[in-house]
Amino acid sequence: MVPQGVRHPATVPVRSCHDRVVGPIDPAFLDEAVDLLGASHVVVDPDVVAGYVADWTGRFRGSTPAVLRPGSTEEVAALVGLCRRHGVALALQGGRTGLSGGTVPLQGEVVCSLVRLSTLEPDGPAGQITAGAGVPIARLQEAASALGWAYGVDLASRDSATVGGSVATNAGGIRVLRYGDTRAQLLGVSAVLGNGRVVTHLGGLLKDNTGYDLAGLLCGSEGTLGVVTAARLSLVRASPERVVALLAFDTVGAALGATGELRASLGALSAVELFLRPGLSLVCEHQGLPDPFDAPHAAYLLVEASDDRDPTDELSEAVDALGAVAEVAVAQDRARAAELWRYREGHTEAINRLGPPHKLDVSVPISALGEFVERVTPVVASLRPAAALWLFGHAADGNVHVNVTGIDPDDDQVDEAVFALAASLGGAVSAEHGIGTAKRRWLHLSRSDDEIAAFRAIKSALDPDKILNPSVLLPPAEEGSGATDPS
Ligand code: MLT
Ligand code: ZN
């Protein structure tokens, strides 16, 4: 199962905010928004609006007077102009599958949903597609496949996650080791900056050294600088033959060691995903799946290889050469491969059923991955002995999804300790989910004062009125670094 929508557990509290910039909304604003977008795209019905104010995990909840649904870049530009005139801030939303609370109107922002921007313009000869911000990743993948190509980014939330959201967060997912993250696919964007300017660079030139890489800057900026309305994306060669295997190990260290060996030995490797025994048991229970092996094991790797020719023999040879594998299950057909993937992709949904999790998506250098996994358990247990810890992730990327359940949504101590551990090992407080609202207090663990000052300078230049995603990425001024100019 993949994230399909937003849940609203009644127990989730409203998060406090420290840098409120959003005031009461001018009633004339909504009248002008109706003139601009049409009444059907200015949603104020509280029952409908309620579906847009919490994140998918249920940990973060805000409020909004309205949800606006522009249908073109021109309408987005006009809307940004309207917001600037009225001093109204926007919370930008795509498929709302983000896991750092980055789409939540925490300060009463007006929600701007980009899902109507759903055009797809394939360019088969170039192996490229221009996709509207609201196109779901699964639809993009299908369009690429129809051209005989593939889209290099894939993630469990593919049915709901959108092109705009994935560009805004520089989404990673399960094939980064093979094709890189979203930024690596991105050739250009169309975007409306916070200052009202429309920047469009969608020519798809492979060689284009004509100044600043605005697409690269907007990618990963989490909607704080501009509203991405379309993206020009590079496609990758389709690899029609695919084989999936589940490997069991009796220690986490053995699984991580095997990850490195597989990267070195298996040219067709396209994914190496890690999960541990507690997570597997939870997924089996939640989805009614049988245990994949007769005996329990400490750690598992879901390994996928893909190529022009059937890579089964190549995969088997590489697995045979691994020293420490306890058991192996190889999928002989697509249905079994999908079943094996469910053991990994079922984690997010199964964990969410336990109550709003703290999702601490970190990355560490590959050489420190074993130490991180070993040390994070006592770090969490010493602070909150009753909490449950779930570890899974993209092993070849050094990306661990540290999920903690059984602690209050507002209790940040575990978050801080886990981020500090990752940072002490040379890691990042966000690997692929973005900073959102969940992590902005800890941006300084991964970025220096001078870097954050540069972020603020860029923000001021491109969004001078702070109308785009004011609750996201940059730390509140009184808490965060880089707030003052040393000159
Ligand atoms: C994943 O890899 O499954 C996603 O990043 C979702 C998650 O962390 O829960
Ligand atoms: Zn992930």
Image (cartoon, grey):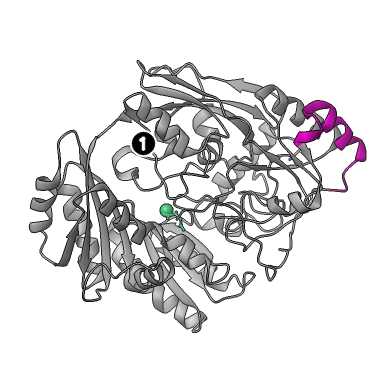
The quadrant holding residue 1 is bottom left
Q: Is 108 left, or right, of 260 in this rendering? A: right
Counting from the top left corner in percent of width and height, residue 453 is at 61, 44
260 up-or-down from 139: above or below: below
Q: Element at badge 1?
A: loop
In depth, the one of 261 and 37 nearer the eye is 37
The quadrant holding residue 33 is top right
302 up-or-down from 168: above or below: below
Q: Is residue 235 visible?
A: no
Q: Residue at (55%, 50%) from the top-left corner?
A: 97
Q: Is residue 26 magenta?
A: yes
Question: In the rendered view of the protein, which quadrant contains the C terminus?
Answer: top right
Q: Is residue 160 magenta?
A: no
The residue that mark 1 highlights is: 152
288 up-or-down from 143: above or below: below
Q: Is 306 left, or right, of 152 in this rendering? A: left
Q: Is residue 440 visible?
A: yes
Q: Which residues are magenta?
A: 23-41
In depth, the one of 11 and 99 nearer the eye is 11
Q: Give the main secondary structure, helix, strand or loop, of the magenta stretch.
A: helix
Q: Specify the amino acid type for callout 1.
A: Gly
Counting from the top left corner in percent of width and height, residue 486 is at 64, 45
Counting from the top left corner in percent of width and height, residue 35 is at 84, 27
Q: Is 424 left, or right, of 273 in this rendering? A: right
Q: Residue at (69%, 59%) from the top-left corner?
A: 61
